């Protein structure tokens, strides 16, 4: 029996600044059904504050504690281990890490840095990795839907640094089981009592299934025909959009 819901944001609830039709009403329907939820996202282009503002503009007044982000997971990891990060991330995300010491960095944090993915920054990260710094990433997603078509995400740059330095990155966002389990724990539930809804067959759906959750792949956002074959595990359901997914779990 489904007792809680995790909902991806970009590609599931919105595309850019626009609501995916019916998504806001679907969230309200889930809430009226009495199911606790968390919005879970790997986005590394906006801090949680901006995500909250975006959702409010779409018609969803969401307290910040309901938005579970990969950047916050990375922040907690750094703080708990007293690591000093070299932040190869989007400028808008810098505020999430502003109270952490960053002199003489001994960890590399990689998100979707966009224009900062230049030779100088990547080479600086490479040298820190050669000195033994861990590579921490918010996700391995290859690409995302930006409304104007598919765009490169952070995953290809993670792979480049792994290859160059001969190391393996630690993923602290989706599809990490640790990330899903932390979100489930916030709901006070067990993994098999929670369903993950998202548009990414690998990170959202495959990752959730591997972590013991249930999952629904929506055919919005980055979804392309045949993505079902990329899930890698059985047990997922598909839905046209978040509205149909809501009907499935509330039936």
Image (spheres, rainbow, N blue to C red):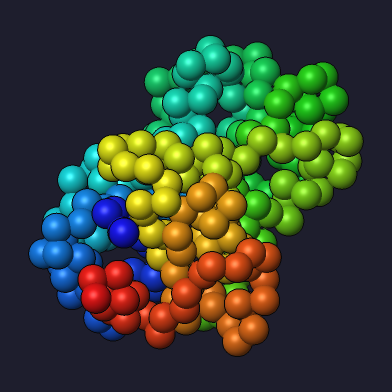
Residue 184 placement (x, y as % from top left)? 37, 43
Residue 201 placement (x, y as % from top left)? 58, 68
Point out the residue furthest to the front here: 1
Point out the residue furthest to the left here: 32
Q: Where the C terminus falls, by quadrant?
A: bottom left
Residue 68 sits in quarter: top left
Report whether 132 appears left or right of 86.
right
- Residue found at x 63% / y 47%: 116
Residue 80 placement (x, y as % from top left)? 48, 16
The answer to whether residue 218 of the structure is visible from this angle is yes
Reply above or below: 128 against 57. above
Q: Where the N terminus falls, by quadrant?
A: bottom left
Reply above or below: 47 against 229. above
- Residue found at x 53% / y 75%: 222
- Residue found at x 37% / y 43%: 190
The answer to whether residue 152 of the structure is visible from this angle is no
Reply above or below: 174 against 200. above
Question: Number of callouts in the render?
Answer: 0
- Viewer-closest of 203 and 164: 203
Residue 219 placement (x, y as % from top left)? 47, 81
- Viewer-closest of 62 and 1: 1
Residue 185 sits in quarter: top left
- Viewer-closest of 235 and 11: 235
């Amino acid at each position: 029996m489904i007792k809680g819901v995790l909902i991806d944001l970009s590609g599931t609830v919105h595309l850019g600044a626009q609501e995916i039709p019916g998504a806001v009403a679907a969230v309200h329907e889930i809430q009226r059904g009495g199911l606790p939820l968390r919005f879970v996202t790997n986005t590394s282009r906006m801090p949680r504050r901006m995500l909250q503002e975006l959702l409010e503009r779409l018609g969803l007044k969401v307290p910040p504690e309901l938005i579970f982000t990969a950047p916050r997971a990375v922040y907690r990891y750094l703080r708990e281990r007293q690591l000093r990060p070299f932040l190869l991330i989007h400028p808008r995300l810098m505020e999430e890490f502003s109270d952490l010491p960053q002199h003489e960095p001994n960890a590399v944090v990689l998100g979707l840095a966009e224009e900062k993915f230049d030779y100088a920054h990547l080479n600086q990260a490479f040298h820190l990795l050669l000195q033994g710094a861990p590579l921490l990433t918010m996700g391995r997603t290859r690409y995302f839907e930006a409304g104007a078509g598919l765009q490169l995400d952070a995953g290809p740059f993670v792979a480049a640094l792994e290859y160059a330095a001969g190391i393996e990155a630690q993923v602290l966002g989706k599809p990490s089981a640790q990330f899903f389990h932390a979100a489930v724990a916030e709901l006070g539930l067990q993994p098999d009592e929670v369903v993950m809804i998202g548009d990414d067959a690998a990170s959202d759906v495959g990752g959730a299934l591997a972590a013991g959750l249930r999952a629904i792949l929506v055919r919005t956002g980055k979804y392309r025909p045949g993505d079902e074959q990329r899930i890698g595990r059985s047990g997922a359901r598909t839905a046209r959009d978040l509205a149909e997914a809501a009907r499935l779990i509330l039936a």
